[in-house]
Amino acid sequence: MPIKNIKNKKIFIDTCSLLHDDFKLFWNSISPVLKNNNIEIIVPYGVVSELEKIIKTKKQKIFHQAIKIYKLLSLNQEKGLIRIQGNENEQFADNVFLSVFTKFRVDFELVLITQDNKLSRDILNLNKSQSVNGKDIDVFRITEGGTLRLYNDKSKKYSSKHQNKTYPDAFRLMKQVTTMEDEKLSISYLPQEGDYVTGSDGHKIKLLEKVAEGGEGIIYRTDTRHVAKIYKPENNTLRKKEKILLMLQKPIIHDGICYPITALKNSSNEFVGYLMPYASGIILQKIFIKKNLQKYFPNWKKRDTVELCITILEKISYLHKYNIILGDINPNNILIKSSKEVYFVDVDSYQIEDFPCPVGTINFTAPEIQRKHFSNFLRSIGNENFAVATLLFMIMLPGKPPYSQQGGNDQITNIINMDFSYPLGKESNKKTPDGPWKFIWSHLTYALKQEFYQNFKKGEKNSTEQTRTSVDRWLSLFKEYLSLLDDGKLEQQDSMSIELFPTRHKKHPGLTYSTCKLCRVEKQDNLMIKEYCKSCLSLKEEYPCDQCGDTIYYSNHHKYITKKNKYSLCNNCYNNNNATHSTRTCNSCGTTFTITNAEKQFFENKGFDLPKRCKNCRGSNNQTNKSNNSSLTSNFFGNIFKNWPF
């Protein structure tokens, strides 16, 4: 994110940002801006002092980086891009920043670039000061690739404990599963097409044609604008009935959430199901396959999947305010009409008070509840937040679960171990799945990658049941992402960042790129040989050996780089043909010579005996014969020409 109205700003930088791995990339991008606007970055003397201490102590990890930065500051001070401010009495940079920003925020628009969370919060708290009417202060941090991002104090937003307040009429949060027996209800007659059922208010509703059928029940159109779910006899239990009646005590009306409207009874006044809003669209699970996604939503770009995530998150956030935990966050239970029109179905499986969600799928089950029976316990909001993060990941990387990897264990083990394979900066287990996934990942915003990484990687700050990222925090991140897409900033950095399936990594500001002549894809120059990318050069053509029929591989590297012609023989046949069949002594000169397998085969095919003389002797004999033949020919034609009348 660039600094807005940079001409009017006083920009300061802290030691930790100067020592950031990608500071050089940041400097390469901002120095032309500083030069064009005739402004400087201010470095307090305390920062310089901290660099000097690092250099003196020779701490191996940052010693060399500190020397480079020290030289860069000196060089750019001469160019007028850096200003060293302060004196040798100011040894502690943090104190200097607080003092200077407190004093000068009345007169100047101040900016601080730092990686230090505590200092960031202390500086931003100056904005809240009621005693001084000062100008706003901005705090930025350097992120991956040398870009700037506004600092947000996330300390109060990350934890699952800090969800938005629930509504006053929300369901109770319970700790123990209901002791109610899950016994089957006795049903004398199961309504079918053409039958009437009765709502809780006594209103008659006619069942029309069947819309769908699942494991639990059958969905019918009705003579209302809603649909009816009629439970199959084996699934119509006391728990289901009581749960539906409990849900109906708090009517929830929200676009796209197919929440029960009324309980339904048959002609014998027996509970058989419930009425709910009609849903339509493509099952989310279907568009997790690329060809289906392109078939049903051919014009979708990255913006659409980001907007889809926002739409889904808003519905989940609404349910959470009623203390409703979805439990089985399953892409088969979400229907998509557009990125802004989404339907949640199978709402009767949600966890309500002491009625658990009795189902779940491996990919959406948190590590701490894997291999448990879902009907025996109540899920926590922390369990739910894992499922939410997984769903978002699988929308942004269409259909790819976060713990899929090369050469990994089974999915349950990977989830329990929290062995996440997508990199954050230099942190990686080198198991990222093959295919487009590494490219899609690289084009996500750093903030989003960081959030996924910190939720899915064991030991990271948001990786536990108590600390996972809340739905409202995800909403904030995705809205920020949408804003970056809509204002064109991401496309300006890299046009491929708006695509659902980019064909290369995100462009790095410090690298140059070329287009491969074969695949027509831009690649980093260090991944190119001449005008071809290494991936294309590794592709091979297959054809059979002329002699044995085994496969011969002819790579694009042979074709375009080394310019080798195709071989007619495989290595085995070539080596065998050139191997020695026998060794002989020449009858003419007495030297030893060899006959290869290929020569033996040649003479035998011609019906000749194997030669008794070496190649030299056979060659000189041939020359003599040619000479004799030439002489005879010359004499013959010479005699003829002598008799020719001219």
Image: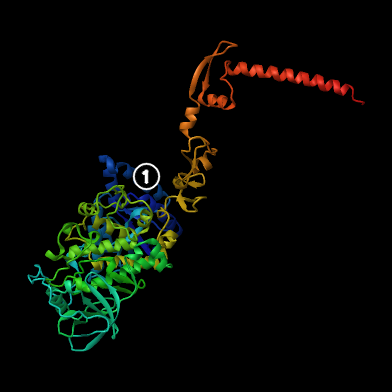
Quadrant containing the C terminus is top right
Observer able to see residue 108: no
Residue 307 location, x and y as percent? 35, 69
Residue 287 location, x and y as percent? 35, 65
Residue 591 lies left or right of residue 5; in this view the side is right
**Quarter holding residue 451:** bottom left
Of 473 and 74, the residue lying toward us: 473
Residue 513 location, x and y as percent? 47, 51
Vertical position of residue 541 compared to residue 568: above or below: below
Residue at the farthest left position:
179
Quadrant containing the N terminus is bottom left
Observer able to see residue 324: yes
What amino acid is found at the position of numbered circle 1 in the picture?
Lys
Identified at 78% across, 21% down, the residue is 633
Of 549 and 442, the residue lying toward us: 549
Mark 1 neighbour density, 10 Å: few (under 14) some (14–19) many (20 or more): few
At numbered mark 1, what does the secondary structure look like: helix, strand or loop?
A: helix
Of 168 and 408, the residue lying toward us: 408
Of 123 and 589, the residue lying toward us: 589
Residue 525 lies left or right of residue 431; in this view the side is right
Task: Tell me the residue that label 1 is attached to.
Answer: 71
Vertical position of residue 167 compared to residue 419: above or below: below
**Quarter holding residue 288:** bottom left
**Quarter holding residue 320:** bottom left
Residue 360 location, x and y as percent? 21, 63
